[in-house]
Image (cartoon, rainbow, N blue to C red):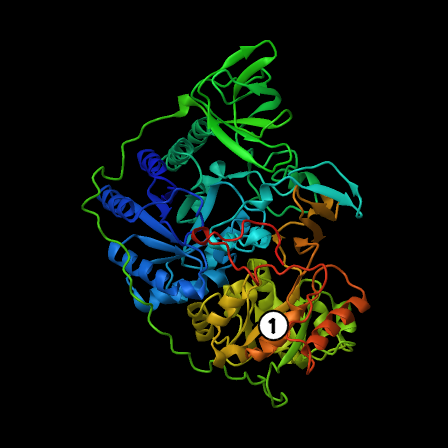
Amino acid sequence: MHSPELLAPAGSPEALDAAIAEGADAVYLGLKSFNARMRSANFTYAQAEGALRSIHRMGRKLYVTVNTVFEDREADRIYQLLKYLAALGPDGLIVQDFGVLKMARDCFPSLKIHASTQMNIASSRGANFLSKQGLSRVVLARELSLEELREIRSRTNMEMEIFVHGALCMSASGLCLFSSFLGGKSANRGMCTQACRRLYYPREGQDAEGPGGYYFSPSDLQLLEAVPVLADLGINAFKIEGRMKSAEYVGAVVAAYRRVIDSLDGDREGAIREAQAILHRDFARKKTRFLFDGQAGVDGPAIHDWLDPEQAGGTGIPLGSVQKTRSGEAGGRLALIGAGDTVPAVGDTVRFHRADDSDRRSLKIKSLEPDRAGLWIPAPPGFEAGDPVYLIQTKAMSRRYPPVIPRELGAFRRVPGRERAPGLAPGPGAGKAAPVPGRGSRRGEAFPPGFYAAVSRIEDLYILQSIRPAKAILGYTSKTGPRLLDKGLPFGPGEMILALDPWFPEDSAKALERELPALLERGYRQFIVNNPGQISLFKPGEAALIAGPWLYTFNRWSWEFIASQGLDYTVSPLENNRQNLERTVPLERRRACFVPLFAWPPLFRIRSNLKEAYSFTFFRDGREGRFRLITGEDGSRVLPERPFSIIDKAPFLERAGFRRFILDFSGPALKKQDYRDIVEALKTGARPGARPEAQPLPDTSRFNWKDGFYHEAEGGPQGGERR
């Protein structure tokens, strides 16, 4: 019987101890930089080296997460980290950025690389593409069903790892821009502020406001009962999420899954019952199988199985709300909570939430004072009547595990050095104009200089006629795809670029495999690819390909990797900033870079049609953010109400050598005059004699263009939309 690897999170030394003691086959941890959980404790270099030695002596494995994108100015630090890890010898690196992949493959070939779930791999094409690049394992997207997993397994020999337990993201894996949009704290940089867990207020129209709810806070994944069928399927590794969780939580979850895995050749049902009892009080959110049993979207209750607006964004057992507060005899604040089914004790840990979701604080109870109306407990400052309180850990849960990391760390002295990353020579064809591919095509350049206009509906193409873009970009979906073979469209195949969706599951891959020959024959030979699996759809030379923003070319190393796959043109990621764009794209390659000047960034891309669950379109958070929900058969998106715009920066960008710009209208429906006004703003700023600093479009956002990503060490922006 195939026994899958049980992989546990180690966000702290205590969690590492619990994971190993309860039977994890492997653990994954992050160091102090470049990992997707920068808010967890993480490990010093000496601790990581000591842990690795102990774990290998036990016959277990240790993986290190380097699963964030890096800016070009950080290339030296990434190189130093990879060189250190190559000397250390972990069992694998979990990677998202193609730049990290290329640097590791070129400079440190001994490193074994796993594809992070942030790479958004949901198809066998994606897995096989990465396998050809030398990766040994793929952590698949969490939005997949059992049938999709079965089909992927039948079409790839690559090792497959899936999440089986823990917190879920609202947005599809690797496709969340919400936290980054709110203040540069990018989920792709390990700084996620969990926008999905916030309290939001629906607005019907622009004025009437509904009651607040946690409309985008999913329940926690639990596939305990599915472990036997997944093991029979041949899944290689079962991953537990939770590098932000306590040692007690990690220990309990590992023990439960260990019990089931060890009984695969025996009493499976009995083992599952015992494991369920272990998880009964894990202090997490309610549990869901998410989309494992198939897609939700048409049936409202099916969605509410994993998405409950009444469920607070935090975790723990509800203790009720604060009734009133007063000063304590020894100073500090006390809060009165009602006497409910669960009564906390001295030594337990509770978390206070502000009713408007603006703050959360945890503390350990050092004293209790009974009252006729309930119980007085210590309270953090700033919390008042009406604020909910949760029990998140009990003293009885505390358990001491044997330490994995040696107490004396003096022998572990390896640290990253100060070497410079080697230079990169541009690959063949870098910066050259891509010719129009295919026999019978007109001579010339596939992507001439100018502005390109993107839309998501066939109907919008007719509006683009009046603004005359260099070419039209059309989002390729289940609705637009069949219409492309019609005659009489306002743009011919040679005048259009088809943008493929970043969410690329097995059914989408099979559909494109069927439809692509007819599209190529019709003359559609220009595509924007947004998922690694889409690159392998095309034979060399049969189409001109652009690397879309969702391939995250934030540094020269990632750009060179993309260019090595035959994609000479790249769209700058929406999260990018001016300084990094200039560093990443040298002068000789700027003609090969498309810069988005206007867009509604999709903050969440959700693999479910939420139309039947939620009737609202507009909503706000508890601060100043205003957003809209767009639903449809291809899923749902959350957009900001204020679009991103740097149209006024077009003259500067042209002077800097950039020649291709994108106006992305594929957000909410617009009037014809809106298109004209936006294009006129671009053309006015670009006219000879225009002022060097044209005026920004009113009621728009700069996203990260000016301030860039948040950097803790540099005291970066603390949040909020910035000009």
Q: Quadrant of residue 492?
A: bottom right
Is 51 drawn above or below residue 69 in the view shown? above
- Nearest to the observer: residue 509 or residue 147: 509
- Asked which quadrant contains residue 418, the reply is bottom left
Any part of residue 585 in sight: yes
Determine whether 398 is above or below 118 in the image: above
Identify the residue at horizontal 78%, vertical 63% (top origin). Answer: 670
Please provide percent x and percent y for residue 589: 49, 79
Looking at numbered disc 1 in the image, what kind of residue is underneath it?
Leu
Give the answer, above or below, for where 369 lies relative to 239.
above
Image check: 683 left or right of 293? right
- Within 10 Å of disc 1 (Cα), the crowding (few <14, some 14-19, many 20+) is some
538 vs 9, nearest the viewer: 9
Residue to which mark 1 is pinned: 516
Q: Which residue occupies the foreground of this view, 367 or 234? A: 367
- The outermost residue toward the left is 411
The quarter in which the C terminus is drawn is bottom right
Looking at the image, can residue 615 be seen?
Answer: no
Q: Percent position (x, y) of residue 241?
A: 45, 42
Classify 464 as above or below 238.
below
Residue 616 left/right relative to 657: right
Q: Secondary structure at mark 1?
A: helix
> Percent x, y for residue 1?
36, 43
Q: Position of residue 305 (x, y in %)?
A: 62, 37
